Amino acid sequence: MWQQVVVGLVLVAAAWDIRCQKIPASLTLGGILSGLILHCYIDGWEGLLFSLQGAVAGLLFLLALFSHGTVGGGDVKLLTAIGALGGTGFVAAVALALGVVGGLLALLMVFWETSLGPVLKGFLWDGYRLLPWFNPWTRGEENPFPYGIAIALGTCITLCVW
């Protein structure tokens, strides 16, 4: 049951991050509360402890990146919500997948910016006028890449092999 909540949560968060360059606190805090309430309802105090441990683990995995300005607070809260819903083992697997996916997406962005992007910019300019909300040349400096995409992909990949 928690798996469906996690998938919905990360898909909405990724879409919001692409569109607005932010993940709303109401979404992530709702995910954290959902995990706490769901596990407490199913397993009582043991479920609540399970969910709290997962939330703390999720918080700790991205806290160092947040302190260096690499990820935003919404990303940290999103992984905290994933931990509250899936527990410590699941959020650790997501963090591992997230590192791989985030690294691959970063390489793709570098390739896009230096090699492929300038060439395609001229050919695809009309396409970007149709999708003005996702134009890699107009991303803000404070958030050059919506990390919610990497979190969503890492979570979905982890759920497929979990």
Image (tube, rainbow, N blue to C red):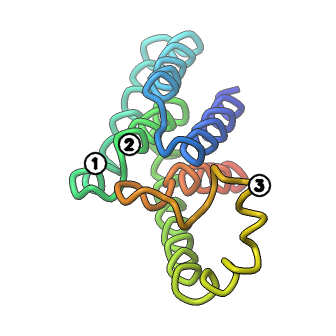
Query: In the rendered view, would you say 79 is above or below 47?
Result: below
Residue that mark 2 sits on: 76
Q: Amino acid at mark 3?
A: Leu
The residue carrying pointer 3 sits among few (fewer than 14), some (14 to 19) or many (20 or more) residues within 10 Å by Cα, namely few
> Would residue 84 be found to the left or right of residue 3 on screen?
left
Which tag, 2 or 1, sits closer to the chain's start? 1
Residue at the farthest left position: 67
Query: In the rendered view, would you say 114 is above or below 5?
Result: below
Residue 122: quadrant of the picture:
bottom right
Residue that mark 1 sits on: 63
- Residue 130 is marked as 3
> Would residue 66 be found to the left or right of residue 121 on screen?
left
Query: Percent x, y for residue 34?
Result: 54, 19
Residue 153: quadrant of the picture:
bottom right
What is the C-alpha distance between the residues marked 2 and 3? 32 Å
- Residue 77 is marked as none
Q: Amino acid at mark 2?
A: Val
